[in-house]
């Protein structure tokens, strides 16, 4: 009898597949001009309400010993992510910061559980480092929201160190220099070989370096603004204070020039071009695997979405507003069948709908000519790492 009760409870926790008619408004077609921000905020509120109910149910099951703290934290993360998205759509930075702080707490608990539950000798390297990257990513976004760009740089440098170590390990595995069965079992996303993991690691490293460039640019501008308030810019160009003392600031004095501040943007554009090329190579390899019946269409569709998303990032960095709008329209139209197809479990349906709603809101802003933060936390942000 207890087994039956437990089974029923777990079925309630996971829930049943749904059709595309999940109670939310149908996706808006960007081609008919009806991408209404207020409508999108209403839909986002409905998703928040869904996750609030899910969390209440998960906490009840936890009290009965039917689900773990890790299971509950997964729901907490989805709730915090949806609330953050709603805060972004409402221009509520206090709400955005509060939810990012909650996500940092969740990711920290995730890492501690992994470290506590598995002895170091048998713990999956991939699982541990993924949790470390997720925590660093969350901390970097919180620091960015707080305007602590120096702290964001440190967190992103941590991701880069982990990504380089991962890339080196995979290269050694490919060469046959090391054998890491525990690592490989967890690392292979589609069990299709180390080549896919290598390309994924290269892309992850490229994205982390791109984000670091953004953070460093903001950090340098922040420092130069602070210095310019107390020391005349002309004195800094000469490398001296107004009192004739040589100033050693370990930053390029030329960055105080408006023209020189734009130089890091060239680096960002080049990094994004590299990311787009890596996306294309990754998609090409997946399509080759699909031809061998080693990969399903679901993975291909998702990789195509990621490519469009990064192409939009590039167009935005290149300051091509018309291309940004066109790419966002393509992204939304490609995402619609992905986000609303029948047979999805309710949780996955809500995750995908939030991604779709966020993309539609971004499209609405682009149509109005409103720029957005290039390091914004969103439904696809965690997929970078």
Image (cartoon, helix red, strand yellow):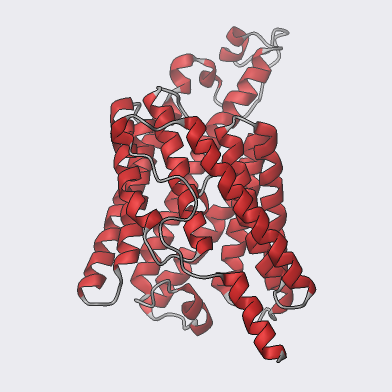
User: Residue at image x 42%, y 77%?
Assistant: 173
Q: Please tell me which residue lies in front, 385 or 249.
A: 385
**Image quarter for residue 197?**
bottom left
Residue 150 seen in the current view: no
Total numbered labels: 0
Q: Is residue 7 above or below residue 307?
A: below
- Residue 31, horizontal then vertical, whole percent: 28, 34
- Residue 274, horizontal then vertical, whole percent: 33, 46
Task: State the quadrant of the N terminus.
Answer: bottom right
User: Residue at image x 48%, y 15%?
Assistant: 258
User: Residue at image x 24%, y 61%?
Assistant: 284
Q: Is residue 192 left or right of residue 243?
A: left
- Residue 54, horizontal then vertical, whole percent: 65, 60
Q: Is residue 105 above or below residue 65?
A: above
Q: Please tell me which residue lies in front, 321 or 54.
A: 54
Q: Residue furthest bottom?
A: 1
Q: Is residue 297 above or below residue 174?
A: above
Q: Is residue 193 above or below residue 242?
A: below
- Residue 37, horizontal then vertical, whole percent: 48, 31
Q: Residue furthest right?
A: 63
Q: Is residue 106 left or right of residue 78?
A: right
User: Residue at image x 55%, y 34%?
Assistant: 89
Residue 295 seen in the current view: yes
Q: Please tell me which residue lies in front, 246 or 382.
A: 382
């Amino acid at each position: 009898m207890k087994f039956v009760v437990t089974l029923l409870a777990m079925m309630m926790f996971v829930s049943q597949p749904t059709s595309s008619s999940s109670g939310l408004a149908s996706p808006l077609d960007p081609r008919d001009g009806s991408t209404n921000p207020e409508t999108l905020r209403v839909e986002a509120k409905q998703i928040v309400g869904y996750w609030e109910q899910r969390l209440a149910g998960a906490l009840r099951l936890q009290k009965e010993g039917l689900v773990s703290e890790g299971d509950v934290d997964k729901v907490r993360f989805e709730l915090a992510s949806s609330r953050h998205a709603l805060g972004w759509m409402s221009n509520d930075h206090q709400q955005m910061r509060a939810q990012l702080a909650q996500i940092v707490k969740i990711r920290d608990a995730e890492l501690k559980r992994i470290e506590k539950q598995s002895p170091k000798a048998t713990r999956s390297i991939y699982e541990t480092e993924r949790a470390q990257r997720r925590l660093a990513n969350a901390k970097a976004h919180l620091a960015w929201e707080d305007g602590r760009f120096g702290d964001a740089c440190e967190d992103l440098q941590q991701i880069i160190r982990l990504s380089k170590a991962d890339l080196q390990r995979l290269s050694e595995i490919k060469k046959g220099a090391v054998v890491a069965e525990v690592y490989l079992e967890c690392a292979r996303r589609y069990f299709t070989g180390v080549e896919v993991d290598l390309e994924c690691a290269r892309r992850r490293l490229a994205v982390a370096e791109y984000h670091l460039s953004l953070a460093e640019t903001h950090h340098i501008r922040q420092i130069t603004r602070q210095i310019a308030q107390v020391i005349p810019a002309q004195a800094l160009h000469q490398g001296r204070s107004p009192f004739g003392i040589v100033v050693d600031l370990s930053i390029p004095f030329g960055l105080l020039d408006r023209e020189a501040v734009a130089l890091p943007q060239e680096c960002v554009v080049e990094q994004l071009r590299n990311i787009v090329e890596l996306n294309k190579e990754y998609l090409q390899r997946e399509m080759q695997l699909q031809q061998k019946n080693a990969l399903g269409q679901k993975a291909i569709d998702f990789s195509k979405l990621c490519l469009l998303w990064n192409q939009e990032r590039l167009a935005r960095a290149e300051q091509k507003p018309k291309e940004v709008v066109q790419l966002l329209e393509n992204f939304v139209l490609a995402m619609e069948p992905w986000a609303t197809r029948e047979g999805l479990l309710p949780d996955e349906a809500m995750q995908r709908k939030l991604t779709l709603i966020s993309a539609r809101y971004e499209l609405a802003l682009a149509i109005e000519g409103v720029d957005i933060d290039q390091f914004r936390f969103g439904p696809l942000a965690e997929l970078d790492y």
